[in-house]
Amino acid sequence: MEHFIYMALIATMGTWAVTALGAATVLFFRKPSPTLLNLMLGFSAGVMIAASFWSLLQPAIETAEQTLKTPAYIVATIGFLSGAVFMWLSDKAVSKMRRRVDSMQGAPDEKLNRIIMLILSITLHNIPEGLAVGVAFGILKDAYSAEGLMGAVTVAVGIGLQNFPEGAAVSIPLRREGYSRKRCFLLGQASGIVEPVSGVVGAVLVTHIRTILPYALAFAAGAMILVAVHELIPECQENKQARPYYATMGIVVGFAVMMLLDVMFSV
């Protein structure tokens, strides 16, 4: 295996590790109150909404302008709508399968549908991010330079920092659904395991991946927006009568944190 592929693998292992650190934040909450859980769930929704634009749609548009002949706005729109439709159809398929299982077991389990959709959306989001890191290192094969290496490292560091709140965006909603802290952490960090795989793929197939990367980024954005709006925001607004603005401020703070990280470490 060529050295630039090893570099991509090491870099994306690092971004996965940061995802795990973010997911580990759930370990510090023993018995959070429903109000605090709603606040954290709102934070997760804000993170996902901000990441959809600054981590995904904006890079998709910029990459399309540089590598594709198709207008960037068309690429972004097609990818975004495809991601949303994919998640909608996935929700339909999961619900149908759950109804079949529940008809045999007798008890519906709606929260499992939400969990599957949440993990799937974050996992889809991590695939193009891993590809972006892999492409950044893969380019060094034919055009190695100190500046190019620093640029690839910057991409990896930026995505890694973004992954911290994203790991929490998976584990915290799972905690609200009643899962143990250990299981929340394991599922949260597992959402980032696709990054090393997609990073290696991106480094190996760099010339081909660059043409589909804008579509993949926009696709993941559409998937995340649908889940954030359809699942997380309604969930965090439960019992809002006691603390009307807690969940809303969680969304605002989550959006602001993710926006700050994305703008500071733009890929």
Image (spheres, grey):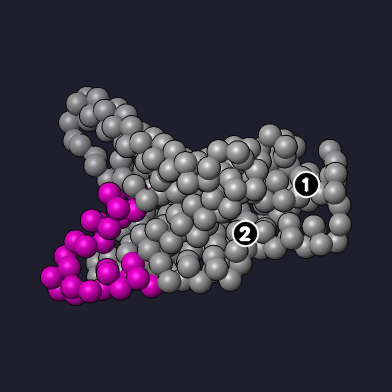
Q: Earlier in the sequence, mark 1 or mark 2?
A: 1
Disc 1 and disc 2: Cα gap in Å? Answer: 15 Å
Residue 30's x, y, as percent? 37, 68
Residue 111's x, y, as percent? 27, 45
Residue range of the region highlighted in magenta in the rendering: 227-253
Q: Residues within 10 Å of mark 1 (few under 14, many from 20)?
A: many
Amino acid beneath label 2: Val
Question: So how many labels did they put on this image?
Answer: 2
Amino acid beneath label 1: Ile
Image position of 89 with respect to 137: above or below: above
Image position of 9 with respect to 91: above or below: below
Q: Quadrant of the N terminus?
A: top right
List the residue tagged with mark 1: 139
In depth, the one of 43 and 172 nearer the eye is 43
In depth, the one of 82 and 121 nearer the eye is 82
Secondary element under disc 2, as helix, strand or loop, is loop
List the residue tagged with mark 2: 267
Q: Is residue 71 left or right of residue 226?
A: right
- Identify the residue shown where x is 50% and y is 60%: 54
Residue 259's x, y, as percent? 48, 68
Residue 96 at least partly seen: yes
Q: Main secondary structure of the magenta part?
A: helix
Instruction: Determine if the magenta segment contains residue 250.
Output: yes
- Identify the residue shown where x is 50% and y is 41%: 75
Q: Quadrant of residue 141?
A: top right
Q: Quadrant of residue 106?
A: top left
